[in-house]
Amino acid sequence: MCSIYMLVVAIVLPCCFEILSLNCGTLMKETLRYLAGIVGPSGYGSKSTAEQVANSCSYLVDSQRLTAIITGATSGIGEETARAVAKRGVRVVIPARDIKKAAELKERIRKDNPNAEVILCEIDLSSLASVKRFCNEFLALGLPLNILINNAGIFSQKLEFSEDKFEMTFATNYLGHYLLTEMLIQKMIETAEQTGIQGRIINLSSVIHSWVGRDCFHFNQMLHPINYNGTRAYAQSKLATILHAKEIAKQLKAKNANVTINAVHPGIVKTGIFRAHKGFITDSIFFIASKLLKSISQLLCSTEPTSRRDEREILCRLQ
């Protein structure tokens, strides 16, 4: 139970520190802008929704020619992303562990947009064999691939292992997405060359990655139930997704590929990642925190890419 509280604090505290670092005049101004949903330089504010962003996104102008794979699309951030881009005509491929939930999502998307093309496939991101199977099935379809959104993630308070004997949070949040990207990146490069449309890979990370210091990025100490800390495991997996994005970006640049990769923090969003951690205290904390949280539909308007300064700080901690 302690881990879930630590995770909440880890996510909310950075926002508080950012607010406290402002002077009183700026604080009042920014607070009012946030509460009122006043748009900023980007043209969007705290009240902007994913659909509004997608509707004005120049990248999606020729969206009928785009294909996107979105993991973790049966709920939360992934579901809203799938719904928003499908409405713009993007062909959406949803790899899911729960095919029944995926089918229900497909029905909701098709109800909203009868012409939407949604393809369902089975995958368990904690299983490397399952990831390989999905990739082979997708490649066999002969479809282009323009967008890969590595969104799926779990948070576990207890030590669990995948079928490959890896710690479950790291296996699901990072290793599965690493292999997924590795097996599909050549298809993305080829698609970009053939169509002239830039390919885009997005790794969903979290501000909590900053909790991992140089002396904490290790796993052996966590592989015992007594030493296991769910928040640390989650933070390490999210730091790994950032380092993964940095390395893949270097490789893409070396190949002069027309494909980009970014790691993003989606902001503080009310999602179901904590759905397995119900309780009076937990529910009370989230009720209070919810006054500062964005709704799922508002998440896409302010995802924050990892800056080069962030990357340098991360690497310094690991050296």
Image (spheres, rainbow, N blue to C red):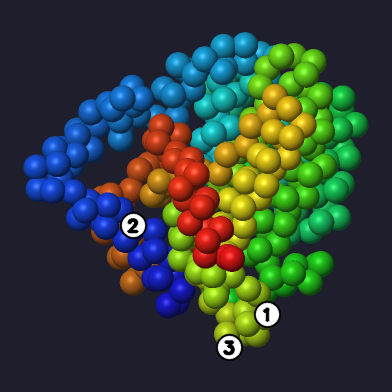
User: Few, some or many C-alpha atoms within 10 Å of disc 3 (few <14, some 14-19, many ≥20)?
Assistant: few
Kindly identify the amino acid type of the residue bearing the numbered disc 1: Asn
Relative vertical location of residue 280 with respect to residue 269 in this rendering, above or below: below
Residue 14 shows which numbered tag? 2
Kindly report which numbered mark, 3 or 1, lies closer to the viewer in this rendering: 1
Q: Is residue 227 left or right of residue 172?
A: left
Tell me the residue at 47%/43% (across/down): 307
Asked whether the residues under the numbered discs 3 and 2 touch, taking CB atoms below 8 Å apart as contact, a structural biologist would say no
Q: CA distance from mark 1 to mark 2?
A: 28 Å
What is the quadrant of residue 38 in the picture? top left
Q: Nearer the viewer, residue 174 or 292?
A: 174
Q: Which residue is mark 3?
A: 226
Q: Which residue is mark 1?
A: 220
Q: CA distance from mark 3 to mark 1?
A: 12 Å
Kindly report which numbered mark, 3 or 2, lies closer to the viewer in this rendering: 2
**Residue 152 screen position, x and y as percent:** 61, 49
Residue farthest along the bottom direction in this orientation: 226
Residue 309 visible in the current orientation: yes
What is the quadrant of residue 87 in the picture? top right
Tell me the residue at 62%/37% (across/down): 261
Q: Nearer the viewer, residue 241 or 224?
A: 241
In the rendered view of the protein, which quadrant contains the C terminus? Answer: bottom right
Kindly identify the amino acid type of the residue bearing the numbered disc 3: Ile
User: Few, some or many C-alpha atoms within 10 Å of disc 1 (few <14, some 14-19, many ≥20)?
Assistant: few
Tell me the residue at 30%/35% (across/down): 46
User: Few, some or many C-alpha atoms within 10 Å of disc 2 (few <14, some 14-19, many ≥20)?
Assistant: some
**Residue 316 screen position, x and y as percent:** 52, 61
Relative vertical location of residue 111 with respect to residue 226 in this rendering, above or below: above
Kindly identify the amino acid type of the residue bearing the numbered disc 2: Pro
